Image (spheres, rainbow, N blue to C red):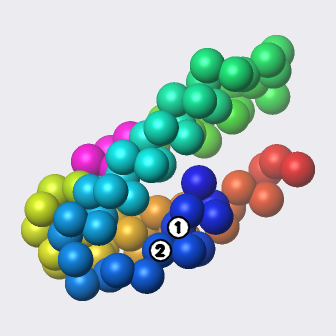
Amino acid sequence: MIQLVKSFTDKEDTVAYKTLTDSLESEFTAIFQKCTMKGEAHNQLHNFLFPMKSIFKRLSSGELKESKLAFDELEEYLKNYTNYFE
């Protein structure tokens, strides 16, 4: 997901935001399907991921201003991943 956000360049196109959201949601689903973590690490990963669902909804809203704001929020949010994982 971090790479998808880093490589996104069509910041003036609402259709591109929808396409990005579709890709992000696909990755999001794959993470949950392939998750083999246990215990507290598992719980924390899920706690980290769940807030992104509301960002995805805003990202694909069809409103350019809202999509841009959601993109910026997601970009900042994903930067925190390495503070907790890896």
**Quadrant into which the N terminus falls:** bottom right
Q: Position of residue 6 (x, y in %)?
A: 58, 74
Nearer the observer, 41 or 32: 32
Q: Are marks 2 and 1 in contact (CB under 8 Å)?
A: yes
Question: What amino acid type should be assigned to the residue bearing mark 2?
Answer: Phe
Decide: few, some or many residues near mark 1? Use Cα within 10 Å; few <14, some 14-19, many ≥20.
some
Q: Magenta segment, principal secondary structure?
A: helix
Residue at 46%, 63% (x, y): give it.
Answer: 74
Residue at 26%, 57% (x, y): give it.
Answer: 18
Q: Position of residue 45 (x, y in %)?
A: 69, 34
Tell me: 44 left or right of 5: right
User: Can residue 75 be seen here?
Assistant: yes
Asked where in the image residue 7 lies, by quadrant, the reply is: bottom right
Q: Is residue 40 above or below residue 62?
A: above
Q: Position of residue 80 (x, y in %)?
A: 67, 61
> Which residue carries the number 2 mark?
8
Tell me: 31 left or right of 84: left
Number of marks present in the image shown: 2
Q: Position of residue 52 (x, y in %)?
A: 45, 46
Nearer the observer, 83 or 68: 68
Residue at 22%, 77% (x, y): give it.
Answer: 13
> Which residue carries the number 1 mark?
5
Tell me: 66 left or right of 51: left
Does residue 77 belong to the magenta stretch?
no
Decide: few, some or many residues near mark 2? Use Cα within 10 Å; few <14, some 14-19, many ≥20.
few
Does residue 57 belong to the magenta stretch?
yes
Q: CA distance from mark 2 to mark 1?
A: 5 Å
| Local secondary structure at mark 2 | loop
Q: Is residue 74 above or below residue 49?
A: below
Magenta span: 53-58
Residue at 29%, 64% (x, y): give it.
Answer: 17
Question: What amino acid type should be assigned to the residue bearing mark 1?
Answer: Val
